[in-house]
Amino acid sequence: MAKKSSKGTWSTRDLLVTIVIGLAFGVLLIPVTWAYAGLLSAGGIFTRAILGGLYFLPAAFAAYVMRKPGATILASILSALPSMLGPYSLIVLMIGGLIGLVGELFTWLLTRYRNFTTARMLWLGMASGVTVYLLILGSMLRTTAFEPSILLIAAVVSAAVFAACSLVARYLANSVVKTGVLANTALGETTADEI
């Protein structure tokens, strides 16, 4: 029988599962990157807030499944790799790293890598969404003239999309863990202990 690894230590299996999570979501995000490029001129700040939030899915999924320091940022960076072949190249990787870093910070602050209730996942998404909005969109928007009400609405939209992605990631992970695919992850072990 395999030994259970502690919360902070990584096994080779943990690393491989996190890599698969990141790259699988990365393939799914390729069309999002192209849609972002195509819709940016039409939707502007709201396209950034809505489609940009979808890049939080791999971070939230990895945080919930792996429950280890570093999983969020690793999955987020890896999920950006396939999209680098699109219209934004290295910018996608930098945004993936930023989303992963912000997600990692709030995963630690809100869950301590062990308490992933629905409410905490919701807060994880909202806090990450507002922070990423302020760091990315806020810095880009200093040179443009938007009404403060538009900026506030875009911040709320960003928080809502990140929160929704966090809950979708939780739902997806709970669905996948029932198949046994994630049996050797922290989520799988937690689910097995509850049965």
Image: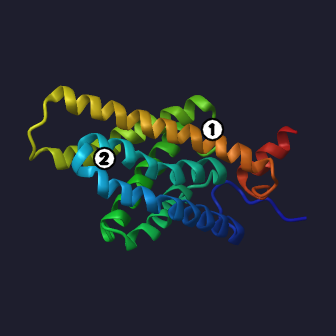
How far across and how far down the image is residue 28, in percent? 53, 59
Which amino acid, by three-letter code, is at mark 1? Phe
In which quadrant of the rendered view does residue 132 lie? top left
Q: Residue at x 77, y 45 (%)?
A: 190
Residue 48's tag is: 2
Q: Quadrant of the C terminus?
A: top right
Image: 86 above or below 179: below
**Which residue is at the far top?**
149
Choose top left, top right, bottom left or bottom right for residue 149: top left
Q: Is residue 123 above or below residue 104?
A: above
The disc at residue 116 is 1
Q: Residue at x 55, y 59 (%)?
A: 25
Q: Is 58 in front, or is 47?
A: 47
Q: Quadrant of the N terminus?
A: bottom right
Residue 11: image tag: none
- What's the residue at 37%, 49% (across, down)? 52
Q: Position of residue 80 (x, y in %)?
A: 44, 64
**Residue sticking out furthest to the right:** 1
Q: Secondary structure at mark 2?
A: helix
**From mark 1 to mark 2, how far is it between C-alphas?**
27 Å
- Coordinates of residue 18 in the picture (x, y in percent): 61, 63
